[in-house]
Structure formats: C-alpha cells, structure tokens
Image (cartoon, grey):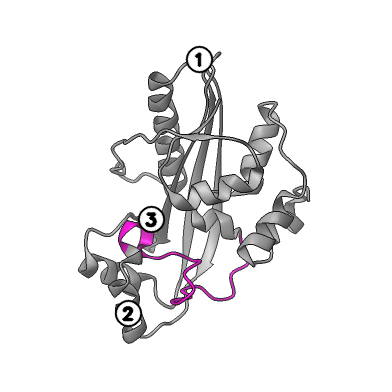
Amino acid sequence: MFVLASTSPRRRQLLEMLAIPFTIHPVEVDETPQPDEHPAEYVRRLSLSKALQAAEQLDRQAIILAADTTVAIQTEADRWSILGKPADARHAAEMLRCLRGRVHYVFTGLALLRNMDGRLWSDVCTSEVPMRNFSEEEMYAYIASGDPLDKAGAYAIQHEGFHPVEKFEGCFANVMGLPLCHLAQMLDQAGISVQNQISLRCVRSLGYPCALDQRYGFRR
C-alpha cells in the first residue's frame, strides 16, 4: 500500500504521473523553522517528521511518501530567510514584493518510509528561481484570485494568468512541490519499479523543458 502523506492537489497530480496506485493520509506537524536553520535541512526535517507521524497511524504494509516545500531568499552574511504560506492577502503582497525581480530558491524535502522494517530514504531538491518584475496591478489581481494563500512564497509557478517566473531552467515539478526524477530514483532504491520516461511525461504534462534530466542523466 503506497501512501502520500499530503493533501496537496499539486503533489497528487504529479504523483499520478508515476502510474503507481496510492492513497492519501494527511498529517500535520509544527512547521516553525528552528533558529538559523538552513532551508534544505528545514524541509528535510519536516518531510521526515511527516513520514514518521504517518507511520504511527498506518499498518505495517504501508510505504509512505512525505514531502515539504519551502521558498527561501539568501540575505546578507550568507543567511537565509524562509518564506512559508502567507497569513492573509496583505502578507501575500509583502512576500511577492520581496521576491519580485530577484532570484530565490525553492527547496523540497522528500522522505520515503517502509513501515514494515522502518527503512527510510531521504532527499532534497533545490531549484534556483528567477521571479519576473511584475506590476502592482498584476500582483493585486493575482492575490484577489485567492491562489497565493495556500502556497509557500505566495505564488504558484504554474499559474496561467500570473506567470510569476521567467527564464527558469530548473525542475519545474520541484517548484510545484514534488520533484519526480528525484522521487523516481528513491523509489528505485526502495525496490519499487516505476514506468520509464518519467521526465518526458513530466515535460509533456507541465509543458516545460527538464534541464535536470539533461544535466544529471535521469532516465527518460
């Protein structure tokens, strides 16, 4: 029994590309960053926490996938500022102004847990994301749609009306919340076979070239 420990419709959509039957079992964890915590360690910690919490609630046959995605900007003195989900429309506007016209980073932590023996696999995918210099009018129209309010960094890269990102060359699926090539490699390590042409199907579905596939030799 393969279980996704998330209610995210975007993760569900992406996971369906692997053609593996799965069920949904959401969990809630405290997402407060620790002092001076690097974003990569933050998402790794939260994804592991989600997987372990789900494991306590599911039977021994479950294989659990948990993920956590965050947006972060690098500040002076090599420090990081983690941007979670906005509390309201005003907070969303603050986040979007902070990201506008500059490069930020999206980190997704993955945790795969085999409940039968407690075996655990973990990975983090990082994408460098250049945000375009959108206008105030575009920003407020996007916020009025309600779309930013449940998303880290207050935006969705795939939003057809807003188009927040330009000249992006990283993993599009990672910014959506589930880097499929990284996940496919983890599943292989766990002895779970997935269909070939993962990145090709991802590219066709999302309409975006996969630079990571070419750079690191992920299988098509």
Asked if residue 150 is among those painted magenta in the image, a careful observer would answer: yes
Give x and y (percent) for residue 38: 41, 46
Q: Which residue is mark 3?
A: 79
For the residues marked 3 and 1, what is the alpha-carbon distance in whole angstroms?
41 Å
Q: Nearer the viewer, residue 85 or 57?
A: 57
In this image, 62 relative to 84: left or right? Answer: right
In this image, 180 relative to 200: left or right? Answer: left
Secondary structure beneath disc 2? helix
Q: Residue at x 37, y 44 (%)?
A: 37
Q: Residue at x 77, y 44 (%)?
A: 196
Give x and y (percent) for residue 151: 37, 58
Asked if residue 184 is among those painted magenta in the image, a careful observer would answer: no
Please tell me how crowded label 2 is: few (under 14), some (14-19), or many (20+) other residues with Cα within 10 Å: few
Q: Are marks 3 and 1 in contact (CB under 8 Å)?
A: no
Q: Nearer the viewer, residue 154 or 44?
A: 154
Question: The residue under label 1 is which amino acid type?
Answer: Arg
Rendered position, 19 above or below 202: above
Question: The residue under label 2 is which amino acid type?
Answer: Ala
Q: Residue at x 47, y 45 (%)?
A: 40
Q: Nearer the viewer, residue 185 or 159?
A: 159
Q: Which residue is mark 1?
A: 60
Question: The residue under label 3 is which amino acid type?
Answer: Arg
Q: Which residue is mark 2?
A: 141
Disc with the residue nearer the chain's start (2 vs 3): 3
> What span is colored magenta in the figure?
149-170
For the residues marked 1 and 2, what is the alpha-carbon distance in whole angstroms?
47 Å
Q: Are marks 1 and 2 in contact (CB under 8 Å)?
A: no
Rendered position, 49 above or below 219: above
For the residues marked 2 and 3, what is the alpha-carbon distance in whole angstroms?
32 Å
Point out the image quarter for the N terminus: top right
